[in-house]
Image: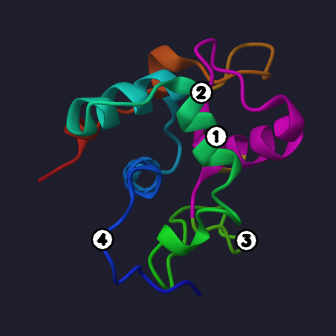
Amino acid sequence: MHAAPKEPLDAPDEYAAAVLGLVRRIPSGRAMTYGLVAEIVGERLGRGGPRQVGNVMAGSGDRYAHLVPAGAAVVGPVQDDHAVPWWRVVNASGAPPARHLTAALDALRAEGCPLTRDGRRVDLRRAVWFPEDEAP
């Protein structure tokens, strides 16, 4: 698919690579908010916020595709050539991107992600994932 960059990354690409790397680690059936992704990446790189995370996610299929490892595939029920599980990143209220609401909710349901009673948002209390939750 995409080749990993060979040269040192510039600041925007370094930030994008950190965001995409973190998002790729979100397990099937779990979710993170743009703010949480920004906070974790910001701890390491000292910059960025939820809007920057959103911009990276919006460009993950084209503008930043070169930062995704060759042959990368999403683990879980939704594996339709997605190298980054964009549907697992939601806003602070648990809502997926409005422009892709139906596709995101379908993917989240397929993965068994806990949703709110109305089925329109992720139940963050039950679904939020933190990197420290990973088994060693």
Give the labeled residue for mark 1. 55
Amino acid type, residue under disc 4 in the picture: Pro
Say which element carries label 1: helix
Give the labeled residue for mark 4. 8
Cα separation between marks 3 and 4 = 30 Å
At x 49% / y 38%, what residue is drawn? 30
Amino acid type, residue under disc 2 in the picture: Arg
Give the labeled residue for mark 2. 51
Q: Is residue 7 left or right of residue 115?
A: left
Of callouts 1 and 4, the N-terminal one: 4
Q: Where is residue 24 in the image (x, y as percent from the top left)?
A: 45, 56
Q: Is residue 80 left or right of residue 1?
A: right
Q: Residues within 10 Å of mark 2 (few under 14, many from 20)?
A: few
Contact flag, marks 2 and 1 (Cβ < 8 Å) = yes
Vertical relation: 123 (above or below) 103: above
Q: Residues within 10 Å of mark 4 (few under 14, many from 20)?
A: few
The numbered dot on residue 80 is 3
Q: Residues within 10 Å of mark 3 (few under 14, many from 20)?
A: few
Of all residues shown, which one is farthest toward the front?
A: 10
